[in-house]
Image: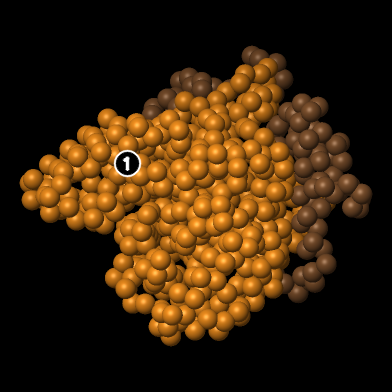
Amino acid sequence: MTAVEIAAAVRSGQRSARSVVDEHLDVIVGGDADIHAFNLVAAAQARVRADEIDGAVAAGRDPGPLAGVPVALKDNLCTRGLATTCSSRILEGWTPPYDATVVEQLHNAGAVVVGKTNMDEFAMGSSTENSAFGPTRNPCDTSRVPGGSSGGSAAAVAAGFAPVALGSDTGGSIRQPAALCGVVGVKPTYGLVSRYGLVAFASSLDQIGPFTTTVADAAAVLDVIGGPDARDSTSISEPQPPVSHTLADGVDGLRVGVLTELSGNGIALDVAARLQAAVGALESAGARVAEASVPAAVYGLSAYYLIAPAEASSNLARYDGVRYGLRVDGPSTPDMNTATRSAGFGDEVKRRIMIGTYALSAGYYDAYYGKAQKVRTLIINDFASVWEQFDLLVSPTSPTTAFPLGERTTDPMAMYMSDVCTVPVNLTGQAAMSVPYGVGDDGLPVGVQIMAPALGEPVMFRAAAVLEASL
Amino acid sequence: MRIGMGQQRITRAECAHVAALARLELTDEELDRFTGQLDELLDHVAEVEALDLEALPPTMHALPIANLLRPDTPGEVLDRDEVLAQAPFAEDGQFRVPPVLGEAP
C-alpha cells in the first residue's frame, strides 16, 4: 500500500494503524539483516504511537493526513529520546533532547516513526559505504551500493520497510540514492523545509526531503513538512501552495529543456536512453521540449567540493568531546579535542574537513573558497537565463546505475563524480527530484532528474506525475 | 591519476599543517594517502582557474535573505540537566574538561 492509501484506510477506520505498523516491522525483521537500511528500529515506540492513532480514530478525531503511515528517518534528523548518530562514532551515546521540526510535523500529521536509517558519515559520500556501522546494500541487487548519502532511507523504501523515508540532500544525497534504488526522491527548494534539528553538514546547501514509491506520496509528505519555521532563520517565511492539489494538471504547453551539459559527456548510454524515453513521454503529453544549455553547470562539482567542505569544516568544529558524544581523554583540552576527533571521525569526514580547512586558510582563501563562491554566482546566472525560456529542465539523476560495493571506496574522485548531475541545483537553491524511469542494461533502476526554479515544486510534480503514468 | 600532470598543489607538510589546524592527528600512512587525494581534488578544481570571474560577486547563499532577528524576549529553552546528561563529563551544572592552559590546579 502507498502512504496515501494507508492514511485513507486508517482515517476511515478500515485498517488499524497498529496492523499497518506491525506488518512493516515484520518486513523489517525479515529483510533488514541483508540490507542494513536501519541503524535503529524503534519497534516498541512505533507500536505505542500506532495505538494512539487508533485511539484517536475510535474517539472520532482525525489523526492527520499521514495517519498510520510508517516513516523511516535518516539518522541525522534529531529525535527526542532516540539515538541520533549520523553513522559516526563521534556521536556515540548521544540522545537528542529535542525533535527536528520535520519530526514534529510528521508526528502531528499522524505518521509513525519506525526507525533511523544508515547513511554516509555526516552525509559525506555517495554510496553509504562511509558509515561507522557498515554499508547498506541495494535491495535491487545486494552486491551493489544503494547510493548515498541517504542510502538507508532509499533502501528502506525500496525494500518495503516503510512507504516513506526522509533524507537530506546537500549535493544529491536524496536524488542519487532514489535513482539507484528505483524510488522517488525530492530535494525541495532551499528554505522550503525547516532544517531545525537536521545535523548540519553544509548549511547553505542542506535540505530535507522525502523518499516514496509514488509521486503522489512524495507530494503528500512535502505538503506536511514544507512551510515557515521560526526556529530556522533560513526558512522561507511565506507559506507555499500545496503540491498535491495540482498533481494531475499535466504538462500540456510546458516548456521543458534537456540540460545538455548534464546529459551527454560521461553519461552511460543506457542511462541516456532512458532520459530520451522520458523526454518522448513528456512530448507525447504535450510538453514542448528543446535542448537547454547551462554552460557553467560543468563547474558545479568543482565549486561544490570546495564550498561544501569549507562549510563542513566549520560546522564539524563542534565535535570536540566537550558537550556530547565521544571523548578520548588527553592531558589538556586541545589534546583531548584532537584525540577525540581523530578517533571519532572516519576517513571521508577527515578528508572533507581538511579540504575545507585548507580552502579557508590564510593565503588560499581567495584562490579556492572565494573563487568557488564566484563560480556559484556564475552557475546561478546561467540558470537564471535558462529559466526565461523554460519551465522545467531534465537530465539523468546519476551518470550510471548502482555500482558494485567497494568499487569506488579507494578513489574519492571517482566517488565524487557520482554527484555531477545533482550538485548544480544545490548551489542554486532550486527544486529538483528524481523519478524512477525503467532500468538500464544491467536491469538496475535509472532515475530521471526534473529541475525547477526556486519554489517551482507544483510544476515539477506535474511533470513527475506524467512520467510515472507513462511507464 | 594525475602523476606527471603538473605541479603538486599541496605538500605533505602543508597537509600536516592543515590537519593540526583542524585538530586532527594523522598517522604517517594517513598523511601519505590524504596528501595524494587532496592534491588530486585540488588539481580537478583548478579547472575554474581559466574562468574570468573578476566582475562577479561571490554567492554565500542562494536565497536573498538578510539576518532574521527574533524579539529579544525569554522563551522556552532546553532543560539544563537533560543537556548536561549528554556530556561525557559534567560537574556542578557545567561541562568538565581537562586543563585548558598550563598545569592542572
Q: Is residue A257 visible?
A: yes
Left/right of residue A365 with respect to residue A187 in the rendered view: right
x, y percent for residue B17: 81, 36
Q: Colour of chain A?
A: orange
The C terminus of chain B, quarter of image = top right
The residue shown at (23%, 51%) is: A6
The residue shown at (61%, 78%) is: A292
The residue shown at (40%, 43%) is: A159
The residue shown at (72%, 72%) is: B56
Residue topped by disc 1: A113
- Chain of the residue that carries numbered disc 1 in the rendered image: A
Q: Which chain is brown?
A: B
Image vertical order of residue A162 relative to residue A191, above or below: above
Q: Is residue A373 visible?
A: no
Image vertical order of residue A347 relative to residue A425, above or below: above
x, y percent for residue A421: 61, 61
